[in-house]
Amino acid sequence: MPPYGWRTTGLAYSENEAVQLAAFLSVDLDGVSIEHGLGVQAIGQHSLGRYTYDWGLPRILRLFRVEQIAATFFVPGYEAILHPTMIEDIAAEGHEIAGHGWQHEDPPTDLASERRNMEQTRAALRRVSGQLVIGWRCPNGRKTNHTNSLLRAVGFQYDSSEKDRSRPYTMTVDTSKLIELPTNIQVLDDAALNADQMLPPRELSKVWEREADISYERSHYLPLIIHPRALWGSCTASRIRAIESLIHHLKSKAGVRFVTGSELSAVEGPRFENA
Ligand SMILES: [Zn+2]
């Protein structure tokens, strides 16, 4: 029996549509926030983030446009100050905007600063995107003991930082619920493209397609994290073909639905409550 009875009313989704695989495509928009947060100039060996703006991001947006896919962009709040029109443009193309730290920092050890980073990120992204901004992904997956509580307190409804399961789930945080959309390293582009492995695009496609086939049968959930940065990112002219080929592979299967984080969390929440 298909695992997802689709209940959202967005765009092309029909009521109670049966979905065999939810493909959650997301982009971690790590521009120069990282370097500025560390207090270094984004030049020379520190210029990787600048590739995002004029090369990586336009390429991935073009691919999504051609394939008619809505994705979720996890964005450091500081990027809304640096490049507000960039985020406006992403949102105008129908993509979801979610939070990804203020300057892609490790979480501060004091609770007040961690909360302030979340609040100012959410406020900045809301202002430029016009969206509610309900999702969050911790930079480098790093959390403190307070992170989940703070996310709920600040108004986030889902998190996408954990690596602990192959399926979305709901966690109880204090007296409320936080939806978790976990990720894993098999479908994180920088795990396969980093300096240790540097898989050629054709090999990368094989890894992703095998993951897609198994997820289709078992977990019914496939998260893919895309980075438009230079070096380990997957939005160079050759590497973006691996993403394109994965999308085509997924489209060749019956019952595959491309979903944003907010759409998935809207399905997962009620599913859990009724379980
Ligand atoms: Zn990141």
Image (cartoon, grey):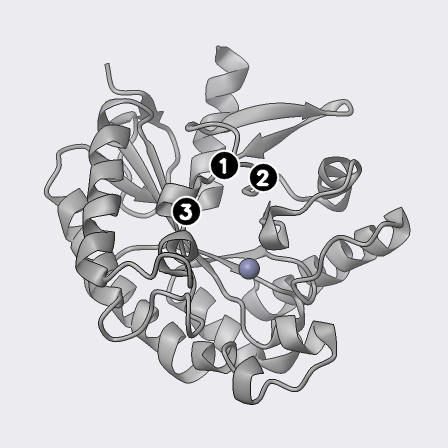
| Circles 3, 2 touching at the beta carbon (< 8 Å) | no
Q: Quadrant of ligand 1?
A: bottom right
Instruction: Give the residue pinned by disc 2.
Output: 158
Query: Is residue 236 rendered to the left or right of residue 91?
Result: left
In three-dimensional space, the C-alpha distance between marks 1 and 3, rounded to whole angstroms, equals 11 Å
**What crowding class fits label 1: few (fewer than 14 Cα within 10 Å), some (14-19), or many (20 or more)?**
many
Find out if the beta carbon at label 1 lies less than 8 Å from the nearest ligand 1 atom. no
| Circles 1, 2 touching at the beta carbon (< 8 Å) | yes
Q: Could you say which quadrant of the image residue 69 lies in?
A: bottom left
Mark 1 or mark 3, earlier in chain? 1
Report the residue at 28% width, 58% height from top.
199
**What crowding class fits label 2: few (fewer than 14 Cα within 10 Å), some (14-19), or many (20 or more)?**
many
* Tag 3: amino acid: Thr
* Tag 1: amino acid: Leu
Mark 1 or mark 2, earlier in chain? 2
Instruction: Give the residue pinned by disc 3.
Output: 260
Mark 3 or mark 2, earlier in chain? 2
- Across and down, in percent, residue 115 comes to 81, 51
Quarter of the rendering occupied by the N terminus: top left
Report the residue at 48% width, 27% height from top.
165
Residue 67 visible somewhere in the drawing: no
* Tag 2: amino acid: Tyr
- In this rendering, which labeled residue sits more in front, label 1 or label 3? 1
Instruction: Give the residue pinned by disc 1.
Output: 181
